[in-house]
Structure formats: C-alpha cells, structure tokens
C-alpha cells in the first residue's frame, strides 16, 4: 500500500519503510513520531484506490523521526561590473529525516 501526502508546499509518494526528508518543523523536544493527516491518495488498498477531494477523510500516515540535517549550501552571487558592487550570500535548508511506520486509510 502506498500514499501520496502533502506537507507544506511539497507532495511525497510514500510506502511502509520509506525514508524521506521533510522541511523542518517546530516539534516538542521529546517528540519521536510525526503524523501527516493531509493524504491526497491511498493506492493498493484492499478496498480499492482512495482518491481525496482534496484529502482522504480519516486517513493518516505515522512516521518516526530519525534526525535532523542540513542540505548542501546554496550560494547566491551578484555582481555588477565597473560599479564596485558584489554580493555573496549562502543558505542551508534544514530538513527532518523521517521513516514511514504506518499508513491508515
């Protein structure tokens, strides 16, 4: 069974045991699981494929938190020739690594 979940501005196709990254969220310090309740579709379900309009009612995906990490640095450079202007900035997005434990539909 698989599910398509929506988290923030992103959509993910997940199955049991899938490990994927989501954007960092403010969670409790002792949180070990995270629950996704915006399920757009559940496929290979015993009762048939469920497609939400816009979400599947009563469906949820429970995942275990595996840690936090940063993406590779994105460098921003701006330069205007002959004007004495140059700008250099960097950004590293923070992500949570999660593993899908349960899909309920």
Image (cartoon, rainbow, N blue to C red):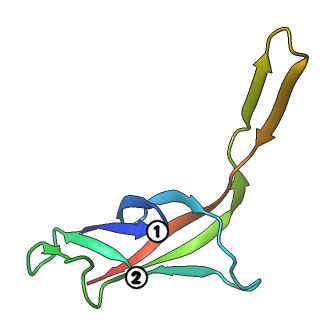
Could you say which quadrant of the image residue 76 lies in? Answer: top right
Residue 77 position (above or below residue 101): above
Q: Which residue is mark 1?
A: 7
Disc 2 versus disc 1: distance between alpha carbons?
Answer: 9 Å
Numbered circle sitting on residue 27: none
Q: Residue at x 69, y 77 (%)?
A: 26
- Asked where in the image residue 22 lies, by quadrant, the reply is bottom right
* Mark 2 neighbour class, 10 Å CA radius: few under 14, some 14 to 19, many 20 or more: some
Q: Quadrant of the C terminus?
A: bottom left
Residue 77 picture quarter: top right
| Horizontal and vertical percent position of residue 102 | 39, 78
Q: Left or right? Give the position of 4 relative to 33.
A: left
Residue, far front: 83
Q: Is residue 31 above or below residue 49?
A: below
Q: Residue at x 68, y 45 (%)?
A: 71
Outermost residue on the left side: it is 48
Of label 2 and label 1, which has the lower sequence position?
Answer: 1
| Quarter of the picture holding the N terminus | bottom left
- Assign a secondary structure to mark 2: loop
Q: Nearer the viewer, residue 58 or 67?
A: 58
- Residue at 84% from the left image edge and 29% from the top image edge: 87
Q: Which residue is mark 2?
A: 37
Q: Position of residue 24 (x, y in %)?
A: 65, 65
């Amino acid at each position: 069974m698989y599910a398509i979940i929506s988290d923030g501005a992103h959509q993910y196709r997940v199955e049991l045991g899938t490990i994927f990254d989501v954007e960092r969220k403010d969670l409790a310090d002792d949180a070990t699981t995270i629950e996704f309740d915006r399920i757009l579709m559940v496929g290979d379900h015993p009762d048939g494929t469920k497609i939400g309009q816009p979400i599947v009612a009563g469906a949820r995906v429970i995942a275990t938190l595996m840690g936090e990490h940063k993406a590779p640095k994105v460098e921003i450079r701006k330069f205007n020739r002959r004007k004495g202007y140059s700008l250099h900035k960097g950004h590293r997005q923070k992500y949570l690594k999660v593993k899908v434990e349960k899909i309920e539909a």
